[in-house]
Amino acid sequence: MSQRKLPRLLVCIQLLVCSLFTSLSYGDALIDDIRSQPQQLQRDYAISKLAQPLSEPQQLAVNAFIAKQFFEDSNYEKAARYYLRAEQLAAKHGTVIEHSRYAQMQGVSHYYRGQDLTAIEDYLRAIEIIEQIDKPIIAAHLYNNIGLAYSGADQIEAAIASYSKAKELYDEYGDEYDQVNIMHNIAVAYMDWYRFEAAFDIYEQIGDSFERLGDTIGQAQMETNLGSIYQSRMDFEQAEIYYQKALVKYQENGDRPNHIVNLIRLAELNFVQGRFDAAYTQMRDAQAQAEVMDNLHYNSNIKEIEAKLLFAKGQYKQAQQALREVYTMREQVTDDKASPAISLIELLVTAAQGDHVKSALLYERYERQQQEMLSNKIASSLNDFQAKYNATELQQQVDSLKQQQQLDKLEAQQRRQMTFLAAGILILAFISIVLLFRRSAERKATAMLEDKVKQRTKELEELADQLSAANEIKSQFLANISHEIRTPLTSIMGQAQAIIEGDVPAEQVAKELRVIYNNSQHLGELINDVLDLSKIEANKLELVISTVSICSLLADINAMFQPSASQKGILFRINNKLPASFGAEFDYIRVKQVLVNLCSNAVKFTEQGEVELAITADEQGVCFRVKDTGIGIAEDKLDAIFANFSQGDNSISRRFGGTGLGLSLSQQLAQIMGGDISVSSVLGQGSTFSFYIPCRCMEMDERSNDTIQAARALSFSGEVVLAEDHEDNRRLIERLLTNLGIKVHSAANGEQAVELTLQHCPDLVLMDIQMPKMDGLEALNLLRQCGYTQPIIALTANAMTHDIERYKAAGFTNHLAKPIEKEEFCRTLEHFLNVEIDARAAQSVDMSDLHESFMHTLPREIESLVSAHARNDLDEIKAVAHRLAGAAQMFASQTIAELVCDIELAAKYQDKEQVGVLIEDLANLELK
């Protein structure tokens, strides 16, 4: 196995960069907010911040923070991804040094993963950036990093060339630590080239420096390399002594990468001495240590030793399998997947298995590789000789030049006599050149102006083409969505008219109403898709993270698609590879929305065969795969299917319907949650969509899966004080509580709520937040001061994550969002009230009279908003809108509810112009 030196300098640079993240001039307040969270929640909290509207400087600060967190957790793949985003933002909003550092940290992340060639590309990009300013020591660090990466990729000549550039800069600008470190790296490169004596000479020069500088890790690395040198000299006793010394230091310093390298060295040493059991033990120890690190070099070297040990034990098939894994890993980091050592092992294994033909071919390959290595060494020696020859020839040229200088001095005296004469001629020539240059400049300026006019004309033509294409896409979308809306609308209107005119027999009315309901649901889903997409593009979509039972989620999906699949004559099945108690933390609604889109498409585009939803999980998250045997997607259409308003081609829309929003919306939702959707497909054979979401997984209480069903069969005993300022809302919730067997005391404001609570001392208080006279927060504080210790639940339409956190921090026991979801409502009450089995709990709440009452009072509320806007009273507008928001979501249409919520939000942010537009839209609605 070739010698490797871990990038000790890279670790120092990484720690320096991480320390500088906290001093970014922009985003300080945002980073402080993130750091105020518990340590284990900071990264997830920072990721959620990226889903909110942030300025680009703030995005830079947050991406840099997240990258640092992933790097410290050894998740180098995700660290590189966030460093890339930080680099792109730093190009516009950061300094040159910061821009270069983020590119460099991508290289460090790729280097730690064993992706040396990719790391080199990142380092070269960082050098190109840093060359804009005069920072030679940073350039030296980068050249040193490039040398390490070249060494990792077995390109030793290129590594030494990079080290040489770094050494020149360190000798002039670096300190003793830098100079010792670069000599150490050069010694490692010599060892990779099997020039052990040259490396030994270097260590004799710098050996005491590590101890003097207090560099324990550097001293341990030197001892590891000295062990390799003694091993090359066949002095196994000295080699083992040095390996053991280094191993102790790595363990004391918690240096896992170097610890792994040293265990690999000891395993090789014991193998050479025929101590196979000891070698196997050390190999397994290194393998266990390497499992937590995603480094292809370590894993390939461990597998190479394992193959040799298995061969020595006579386990030839297992050795052959280990070699195949070595080839696979080496292909990912270098073009030369088969070194002579690996070819020799494979030759021996194949011969032992009796395959003499293949053994002969492997022997030829081994001989060829040995010859190539010998040729490379000869070429290197010739290069050294050529360099020495060139140096001698250069010295001769220098001596010749010195003689020539003496002659030049004599001739200079003669030239001075001609100077004055030549000066006059030069002045005239200069004037002529200036005139000619001016005329040439004028012609160039004219030509440049003509080129700019042509370029601008071309750009305008391209812009016109883009606008034309955009208009075509818009027209196609409008045609598609018009068809999608008119189709169910035609059915709704036709069925409704038939019922009104009495054309439908009484016994079939329920069936026709179900048709109307199903088509209405389809219209609602279509509108929700468009609105969700608008929220995503406006950065207004927030995630609501909760603990979700995977079995419950799959049950919902199965109930939704099993009937439609059966109706089409295809099989819809769920392949759940997770235990029944498996749970995960994510946004249930958004994950379900993505799965519904993917499964809906699969069922829609599958004429025969089956649709399968498979679920797997790993330590990082959950993966859902939707596989169908449908029409498939052409390879040249795969990139377009995630675009807005796009399907495979226009014929797809004509045959199957759809607006082309589902996959675009799903992909954007997946990315907001930190995940991704990928697709593979064969035209005419089917498609597979893989939806991966990173999340925390855990075991759940088995009873949680049955909570929803249980809630429907529960009734309660106890007293509750209900504080709600809107009369219709208050009547609805009071009716719901009464149906559940609960005694209710209702209050219209905070003062009444405090009086009723102190008078009756109820088991639970449901407290609205914004109320007249005294709001919910003031009422909460007053009740606590008066000694009331029973639970108080916040009851509000403000269901944003930050609002919920604020209510809980203020002292509320829990939170319930409006509009009221009966099942969630029952689940919450179950924690605070006595539960009894009662059939009344299954009864639904009749809200028809409440709906009529709300719609009757709504025009008066709209007049209040118009009047307040005329007075420019934003506080009044916010209060009225908040009072309407919860009730509108329960008793009015979705359009009215969203308008009222938007009015409240615009008033909160003092956007007077937007408030006026929204109130006008609300006033112009036809109220039904």
Image: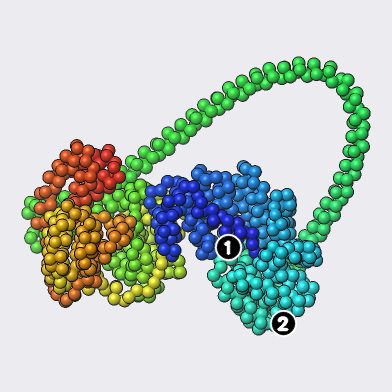
Q: Seen in the image, is 456 located left or right of residue 656?
A: right
Q: Which mark is residue 716?
A: none
User: Quarter-wise, where is residue 736 in the image?
Assistant: bottom left
Which amino acid type is marked by label 1? Arg
Q: Which mark, by number, is residue 274?
A: 2
Dot 2 surroundings within 10 Å: few (below 14), some, or many (20 or more)? few
Q: Where does the image place residue 550, in percent across and percent down from the top left?
A: 34, 69
Q: With respect to residue 642, does 260 lie above or below?
A: below
Decide if residue 314 is on the left or right side of residue 924. right
Seen at 50% across and 61% down, the residue is 70
Whether residue 653 can be seen here: no
Q: Earlier in the sequence, mark 2 or mark 1?
A: 1
> Which image quadrant: the N terminus?
bottom right
State the residue at coordinates (8%, 59%): 505
The crowding category of the residue bearing disc 1, from other C-alpha atoms within 10 Å (few below 14, some 14 to 19, many at least 20), is many
At 85% from the left and 54% from the top, the residue drawn is 385
**Residue to which mark 1 is pinned:** 113
The residue under label 2 is which amino acid type?
Answer: Gly
Residue in view at x 59 percent, y 70 percent:
254
Q: Is residue 323 left or right of residue 906?
A: right
Q: Assess whether mark 1 and mark 2 are in contact (beta carbons under 8 angstroms).
A: no
Badge 1 marks a residue whose secondary structure is loop
Q: Residue 747 placed where, x, y %?
A: 13, 59
Closer to the camera in the image, 593 or 359: 593
